[in-house]
Image (cartoon, grey):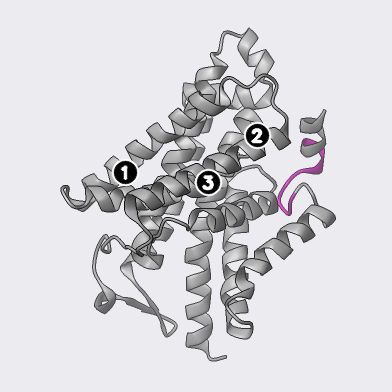
Amino acid sequence: MTLDVFAQYLITGVCVGCIYAIVAIGFNIIYNTTGIINFAQGEFVMCGGMTALAFYQWLPLPLAVVAAVVVTMLLGAAIEFLFIRWLSRPTVLRTIIITIGISILIREAAWHIWGNQVRALPPFSGDETSSLVILGAHVTPQKIWVLATCAALVAALGFFFSYSLLGKMMRACAANRNAAALCGINTRNLVTFAFMLSAGLGALAGCVISPVTQTTYDIGPGLAVKGFTVAILGGMGSSGAAVAAGILLGVVEAFCTHYMPLAFKDALALGLLLLILFVRPHGLFGNRALAQLKEC
């Protein structure tokens, strides 16, 4: 393998891994606030990309992306209000089944609305001819957008959870929901906001990745599995751990496609997920003591 081919696989893996990381961060936000594993997270990515494409027929691209994020956030709020809020002490298995059912409903609705055509937003800036060359590898401007978006989201979320009042309330809810409620925090509304925030992150990821990988109605389940794998790999913890785990999975997938058939790429993620669950259930970057504390 030559240096330029190595660099191309590496950059592609990092780019794809950043998208996996954003999906995993969405998993983390909902799980840490509610204890729910939301397998409809991949559908938020799909809805973001497809909705932006619909708005792009009438609006400039930046406004279409903003509108898609807002609409998907409202979808996340509606899902929480209609299917989650009224559950009394739901078990993990029950919520997994419910969110998988929601994922199927959203996917079927998307198929009826948009059909099964493969679509793509135009690049946010530049084109293939304006690619940067790094160690012989061509990096399109859209891939830089993906990397910059991931970095900006991690920084913004770190600031939000550390310094904003709402972020501190969500951290309190994640630490002990009953204690937070006794302190006067409206935990129901925080759960709704967690779903909205998670949906918005997924929608933004769907918009940013659409010019690179294209968008279709059935991309959600694959992204949900990859995002969940990354969330487990990172230990269901910080955004930084999710980014590291996402980049790791993306790079491993990219290089494996050089030596194995493309069909084995998804099997690799599932195999890695099973291995982590057996060998290190709290994740590569998770804290064993913290994981045990959460189980108590």
Along the polypeptide, which appears first: circle 1 or circle 2?
A: 1
Along the polypeptide, which appears first: circle 3 or circle 2?
A: 2
**Residue at the image point whose x is 36% and y is 65% from the top:** 118
Along the polypeptide, which appears first: circle 1 or circle 3?
A: 1
Image quarter of the N terminus: bottom right
From the viewer's perspective, is the residue at label 3 or at label 2 nearer? Answer: 3
**Residue at the image point whose x is 78% and y is 38% from the top:** 291
Q: Nearer the viewer, residue 208 or 159?
A: 208
From the viewer's perspective, is the residue at label 1 or at label 3 nearer? Answer: 3
**Residue at the image point whose x is 44% and y is 43% from the top:** 201
Q: Nearer the viewer, residue 146 or 118?
A: 118
Q: In the rendering, at what x and y percent does residue 161 appear? A: 52, 32
Q: Amino acid at mark 2?
A: Thr
Question: Which residue, given by chain and number where applicable, does mark 3 sit on?
Answer: 104
Q: Amino acid at mark 1?
A: Ala
User: What secondary structure is the magenta-colored segment mainly?
Assistant: loop
Q: In the rendering, at what x and y percent does residue 76 appear? A: 45, 34
Question: Which residue, given by chain and number where applicable, does mark 1 sit on?
Answer: 68
Task: Report if the CB atoms under discs 1 and 2 are less than 8 Å apart.
Answer: no
In the rendered structure, does residue 138 fall within the stretch colored magenta?
no
User: Is residue 167 something that shows in the picture?
Assistant: no
Question: Which residue, given by chain and number where applicable, does mark 2 sit on?
Answer: 95
Q: Residues within 10 Å of mark 2 (few under 14, many from 20)?
A: some
Q: Is residue 173 left or right of residue 158?
A: right
User: Is residue 187 something that shows in the picture?
Assistant: yes
The number of numbered discs placed on residues in the rendered structure image is 3
Q: State which region is magenta.
A: 283-290
Q: CA gap, disc 3 to disc 2?
A: 14 Å
